[in-house]
Image (spheres, helix red, strand yellow):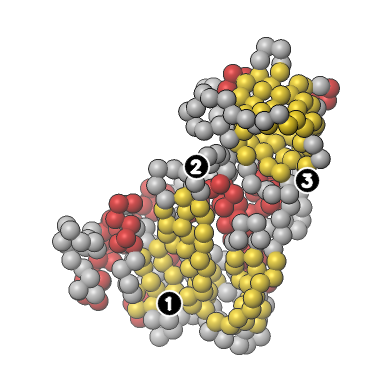
Amino acid sequence: MKGIVSALQCVGAALLLSAGSAMAAPMLLQGTIGQAKVLVELDLDKPGEVSGRYFYQKYHADIALDGALDKQRTLRLSENRPFFSKKSVPMQWTLKQGANGHWSGRWADKGKALPISLSPVAEPPADANDLPALDELRRTATYDYLRLKGLSLKKDRQDTFMGYGLQWWAEPVSGIRLFQLVSSPEPMDLSAVNKTLRNRQWQEVNSYFGCLSGARERHTEFTQTVKPVFINDSVLSISVFTSYDCGGAHPDFGDAPLNMELATGKILELEDIFWLGKGPSIHYERGMDNLEAFSNYREQIFAPWVVDQFKRLYPELMNDDPNECNYQDPSVWQFSVWYFEPRGVYLGPTFARAARNCDEPGDTVIPYKTIKAHPGPVKVTLPD
């Protein structure tokens, strides 16, 4: 699981209709079940196969909905029906649409019934105080945006790392924790790097809810261990290790480090600080059109170079025994996990799920002397 933040997607953000038609957003409603406030997202595009989700604003976790809208425009929904099951479930909704997009009806469960009252949600206006991750959700996934807007970070413990003061913050519902910098050995403006740290924390909180969303009767897990691994007056690296089981066939785990330029808060890619190719470095980001060129560089130049280096640096590790972890295979280094360490840049391999135990070979570090011999376009200060 590399790059879990990009891999986990918000459920129901947009629906693909028939060929040639436009993208249609789900219907978003807010209101009450009994006295409890709820936010509801429904896809009514196929009346016979209505799907959706909702959460109680007190608890924030999704409850799946599915059902049908009949010819009399009565909407009947079940909660958390097991996948591929046709059996009825105890918790049922019955709704009718009224004027101005209002829906009303009742919620029933084992003889207990509560009234439902729902109204359309207006598109939230832009908020100048929103972090980039939140503003993107506002534009693309309003349901997820409104959930996060109802949450807040709470101060946790303080500690120090390599001379820098850390204030940890926790989001209580998800348990996602990350720190911000509160002091440095020499006076410097830490606001930009702290903004990047807050932004990543809210991305992880959203990933937590994305993992749980739609799980229904299945077991889910999303736990994280965050630790700083290196900081100086130029760069900061953090390990963000996640174990997750989002209701699929198998659980998974992996590290998705965060590497930043300290003064600007800019997220660094490996090609920003280390480049083996000719000409300008290829820096791939989501939405850019150079993925093929980037992949070719990593496959044809970078990965074979890493294998050659590690054969020299770590000969005992680099075996080609098919019964062991084959670190001589260049493909496992093509999209390496990386971060700064005191002795150099750590590179971690990426194996298929069946060999995931091979993902942590130990101190597979490229010394800074070698990194400096192949600099990228971003000038950072690194140890000798």
Residue 29 in the image: x percent, y percent?
Answer: 74, 34
Q: Circle 3 is placed at which residue position?
A: 125
**How many neighbours does mark 3 have within 10 angstroms: few (below 14), some (14-19), or many (20 or more)?**
few
CA gap, disc 3 and disc 2? 36 Å
Say if mark 1 contacts mark 2, CB within 8 Å.
no
Which of discs 3 and 2 lies nearer the camera? The answer is: 2
Task: Of the two numbered discs 1 and 3 on the same chain, state the one appearing first in sequence.
Answer: 3
Q: Which amino acid does label 1 sit on?
A: Glu
Secondary structure under badge 2?
loop
The residue at 61%/57% (across/down) is 174
Amino acid, disc 3: Pro
User: Which is more foreground, mark 1 or mark 2?
Assistant: 2
Question: From where the camera sits, is residue 372 visible?
Answer: no
Label 1 and label 2: CA atoms lie apart by 39 Å
Residue sitting farthest toward the right = 99
Residue bearing the label numbered 2: 218
Q: Which residue lies furthest to the front in this view?
A: 111
According to the picture, the residue beneath numbered tag 1 turns out to be: 341
Q: In this view, does 248 lie above or below 200?
A: above
Earlier residue among tags 3 and 2: 3
Q: Position of residue 157 (x, y in %)?
A: 64, 76
